[in-house]
Amino acid sequence: MFVGSTRAFRTMRLGSVDVVTLGFLDPVEKAYLKRRFAERMEVASLSGSLSMDGERVHVHLHAVVSPREFVAYAGHVHDAKVGAVLEVFLTALPGRLERVSVEGQPFPTMLLPGEPKPKPPKKEGAGGR
């Protein structure tokens, strides 16, 4: 999937999907509320990043899609099936974007090149007074 030593990409896409599951991250529950659309939808925008989680590729995409009624739905892409066509444009970035799991976070955190891994949050009542 990656070309040479490139390990970071920015992506833009447009076209259509026949099925897509979008999610909204609930900040209180720290879980995605998901909605699945099983109909032809135009992809007005699909952007995000490809980074590395160890040696696994981590795909992080958000989309704006629209059915024939010309309304827009947006959210985090959990899965999708291409419709008639989906044009994909990848822009290679220098370096390597990393994702790491951090205690207390519902999803891996992105690290920029040279950035240290974040420390887990302090637990209440620990180490203080």
Image (tube, grey):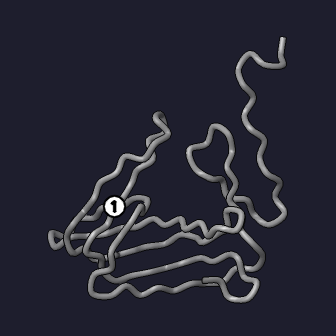
- Of 97 and 52, nearer the camera is 52
Quadrant of the image containing the N terminus: bottom right
Residue found 83% across the figure and 16% down from its top: 128
- Of 43 and 8, nearer the camera is 8
Task: Please state the horizontal and vertical placement of residue 28, each as a whole percent of the image.
Answer: 47, 34
Tell me where residue 68 sits by quadrant. Answer: bottom left
Residue found 29% across the figure and 54% down from its top: 35
Residue farthest to the left, as pictured: 69
Tell me where residue 40 sits by quadrant. Answer: bottom left
Residue found 31% across the figure and 66% down from its top: 20
Q: Is residue 39 left or right of residue 20?
A: left
Task: Please state the horizontal and vertical placement of residue 29, each as a whole percent of the image.
Answer: 46, 35
Task: Please state the horizontal and vertical placement of residue 89, each as a whole percent of the image.
Answer: 51, 86
Residue found 42% across the figure and 47% down from its top: 32
Query: Quick check: 82 above or below 105?
Result: below
Look at mark 1 in the image and give the residue it sits on: 21
| Amino acid type of the residue tagged 1 in the rendering | Thr
Q: Residues within 10 Å of mark 1 (few under 14, many from 20)?
A: some
Quadrant of the image containing the C terminus: top right
